[in-house]
Structure formats: structure tokens, C-alpha cells
Amino acid sequence: MKLMLYGCAVIAALGLANAQADNAGPTDAQIAHIVVTANQIDIDAGKLAASKTQAKQVKEFAQLMVANHTEVNKAAKDLVTKLHVTPEENPTSLSLKEGSDKNLANLRTLSGSAFDKAYIDHEVAYHQAVLDAVDKTLIPSAQNAELKALLMQARPTFVTHLEHAKQVQAMLSK
């Protein structure tokens, strides 16, 4: 039940991007902060999972999340530096961070198969929410062509992560 609430909070937080700037969508500076925040959330959860799980497929998935999301964050940070854009904290990035803190606190209380299930279930919900936000809000709202291109380049990675998380989820259900 807690996991479902965290998943709903993530989806609601990402949906807040639609309400930014009087429904005009988030600015590029806000999008940059959302992207960095969303990636950092998965890096933090992945590091926790990699250190805590005993399941090989969960550990491999977590390590992949850390590596891939670190790459995306590096690319995003390099781009905002190049464009002289300062990522702007906003209601969506703040809500994402709050949801992440709650998720990590919950995960820290779990162990064994309960931990693995909670981590992977969250990853499925989180990646679906990220994809929805990328498709419906972030790409359409991005004004800078390079920022839009970065989002479009990162999108297939998020799709792959979602599918991989679903595969691990299915393995854990057996």
C-alpha cells in the first residue's frame, strides 16, 4: 500500500509540470532542474538497492540505473553549463525530492524479498511516470533545441529501463 502511495506521489509530482507557469508548461531552467532531480532520485535508489539486495537481477538492475542515470545527469549538467542556464527549483522538482525521501525511508525499513519487490515496483511506476512527463510535458515545453534533443535522446533509455524493470518484477513474482 505504501508503494502505491509513493507511485501516485511520483506521478502527481511529474504531473505538476503541466501546472507550471500558469499552464504554459515549465521553463527550460525548470525542465533542467526536473531532469537532474529525477535522475538523481533513481541514482540514490539504485545505490541503496545495489548495497542492500542479495538478488542478482535486482543488483544488476540497480547498478545499471546508477550508471545510466549518472550519464544522463552528466549530459544535462554539461548542456546547462554550455547554455549558461541555471536549473531552477520548482514545485515539480521539490515534490519529486519529497517523494524520493519518503521512498528511500520506506526502502531502508525493508529487507530481503520485501525490499526487492518494493524497489522494483517503485522503479516500474517511476519510469512510467517519467516517460509520461517526458512525452506530455517536458519535450513539448522545452524551448531550447538542444535541451529538447537531450530529452529525446534520453527517452529510449527510460523505455528500456521500464521494460527491464518489468522483466525483473515478473521474475520476482515467480
Image (spheres, rainbow, N blue to C red):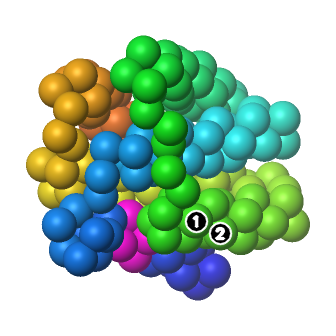
Tell me, yes or no, if residue 143 can be seen here. yes
Q: Is 31 left, or right, of 39 in this rendering?
A: left
Q: Is residue 99 above or below residue 55?
A: below
Label 2 sits on residue = 98
Q: On the picture, is 60 further left or further right than 16?
A: right
Closer to the camera, 55 or 29?
Answer: 29
The residues colored magenta run 11-16
Q: Residue furthest front?
A: 84
Residue 71 x/y as whole percent:
52, 18
Label 2 close to label 1 by CB (< 8 Å) = yes
Residue 16 in the image: x percent, y percent? 35, 72
**Amino acid type of the residue that numbered disc 1 sits on in the rendered structure:** Leu
> Is residue 161 highlighted in magenta?
no
| Residue plotted at (31% across, 44% down) | 28
Find residue 94 and name its label.
1
Instruction: Please state if 42 lies on the left or on the right of 26 as rendered.
Output: right
* The N terminus lies in quadrant: bottom right
The three-letter code of the residue at mark 2 reads Glu
On whether residue 12 falls in the magenta region, the answer is: yes
